[in-house]
Image (cartoon, rainbow, N blue to C red):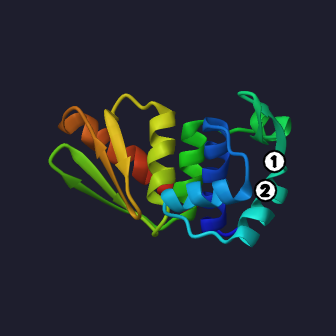
Amino acid sequence: MEVMKQLRQRAIRDLVEGRPIRTQQELATALRERGFRATQATVSRDVAELGLRKANRQGRSAYVLPPALKDAEATGEERLQRLLADLPIEVREAGLILVIRALPGSAHAIAAALDRARWPEVVGSIGGDDTVFVATTDRTALRRLRDRILALSARR
């Protein structure tokens, strides 16, 4: 599966888990807010491939993940490892901030996976389009984080 499709489908899963999404148009709009360009046809294919179904959420019919997809959810570190193994990245230091540059549209997914991994070196992260800023507490934490990121991104 291509990287952008993986990132888009990951975003769809996060959106559906996070709030009630009632229509494909609403889903396409939410994806655009996250920086993804997706036509209605693309969203329709993604909904089918992910096996999303409608169910009652907060008194309204909205998309939900199928149980098998929820059970197969990877940890933040596993997701981060998959993302970094598939993406070309550049890692630089700026003070106590680690700057990760990747493909356009991938930064949000990387930042979300970092946050979900709950590594002690990470104070917080901000993901834009192709750049992630990761705040650390001190130089030791910064170096340890850089080494962990580089190790996960190593090609097998």
Q: Quadrant of residue 1?
A: bottom right
Q: Residues within 10 Å of mark 1 (few under 14, many from 20)?
A: some
Q: Are marks 2 and 1 in contact (CB under 8 Å)?
A: yes
Q: Quadrant of residue 104?
A: bottom left
Location of residue 3 in the rendering, given as x and y in whole percent from the top left corner = 61, 66
Q: Residue furthest front?
A: 59
Residue at x 82% of width, y 58% of height: 49
**Camera-nearest residue between 5 and 136:** 5
Location of residue 54 in the rendering, given as x and y in whole percent from the top left corner = 83, 42
Residue at x 45% of width, y 30% of height: 118
Q: Is residue 106 left or right of residue 128?
A: right
Distance from Cα at disc 2 to Cα at disc 1: 5 Å
**Camera-nearest residue between 100 and 156:** 100
Location of residue 112 in the rendering, given as x and y in whole percent from the top left corner = 49, 44
Disc ID at residue 129: none
Mark 1 residue element: loop
Name the residue type under label 2.
Answer: Val
**Camera-nearest residue between 99 and 59:** 59
Name the residue type under label 1.
Answer: Leu
Q: Which badge, 2 or 1, comes first in the chain's sequence? A: 2
**25 lies above or below 151:** below
**132 lies above or below 137:** below
Q: Is residue 154 visible?
A: no
Mark 2 residue element: helix
Disc ID at residue 52: 1
Disc ID at residue 47: 2
**Camera-nearest residue between 134 and 93:** 134
Q: Quadrant of residue 15?
A: top right
Location of residue 79 in the rendering, given as x and y in whole percent from the top left corner = 59, 46
Q: Is residue 19 left or right of residue 88?
A: right
Q: Is residue 19 left or right of residue 49?
A: left
Q: Is residue 72 visible?
A: yes
